Amino acid sequence: MKIICSDLEGVFIPEIWVNVAEKTGINDLRLTTREISDYDVLMAKRLEVLDKHGLKLKDITDVIATIKPLDGALEALNWIRERAQIIILSDTFEEFARPLMKKLNYPALLCHSLVIDNEGKIADYKLRQANQKKQAVKAFKGLNYNVIAFGDSYNDTAMLKEADYGFFFRPPDNVVKEFPQFDVTHTYDEIKAKLNSLI
């Protein structure tokens, strides 16, 4: 029995924080796990920037409401779901992801959550589990699933290593250079071809 695990941002939807940066003009929010490998360092920087500029959860969710899935993403996701179970493992937050999941026909998603204060500011974040992508794959393997995983960033590499088979989708050159052991796909047709050979 096989199960597929994938990332969300950069795979099926655009990077949320990049869109927030573009809408607000705050370039410091452009950084993602494609550039910074330590998630806690990245989130600490994001929270500092949000506080400095007085941005609240609603400012971010207003931007998220305008985000659409990447071209071809919904069709590709539906194609995968007709052939295998897929679980999206993301380092985003439930509060961000809800409206996006509707646009993707509600796939299964495991992610983190935010701590919101009485004024609607993002005070902190709660990891569902440290290194949750790797741990989820490990748990699925413990249930006797053969796991195929794909993603695009530093925070996906532990998941890809833990999976029975892992590959990249549209990763930046710096990530490819550091992890040459993983095959690279660039289009949804290439993902389909890869999965057809594996499931």
Image: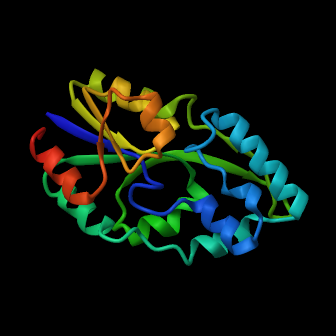
Residue 156 visible in the displayed image = no
**Residue at the outermost top position:** 142
Quarter of the picture holding the C terminus: top left
Is 125 positioned to the left or the right of 181 in the image?
Answer: right
Q: Is residue 109 left or right of residue 45?
A: left
Q: Position of residue 66 (x, y in %)?
A: 55, 78
In this view, 54 is above or below 176: below
Q: Quadrant of the N terminus?
A: top left
Q: Quadrant of residue 127?
A: top right
Q: How many marks?
A: 0
Q: Position of residue 185 (x, y in %)?
A: 28, 48
Residue depicted at x 38% and y 51% = 170
Residue 175 at x, y percent in the picture: 48, 37
Q: Nearer the viewer, residue 183 or 196?
A: 183
Location of residue 40 by image quarter: top right
Instruction: Give the residue displayed 21% in from the left and 24% down from the top.
Output: 144
Taking 139 as reference, is 126 above or below it? below
Relative horizontal placement of residue 105, taking residue 145 as reference (left or right): right
Q: What's the image's color scheme?
A: rainbow
Point out the residue furthest to the bottom here.
66
Tell me which residue sits at (61%, 48%) in the image: 32
Q: Is residue 31 visible?
A: yes
Q: Nearer the viewer, residue 36 or 150?
A: 36
Question: Residue 24 at x, y = what percent?
Answer: 75, 72
In this rendering, would 145 be left or right of 161? Answer: left
Q: Taking 155 as reference, is 103 above or below it?
A: below
Please tell me which residue is depicted at 32% across the width and 65% down the height of the picture. 73
Rendering quarter of residue 158 = top left
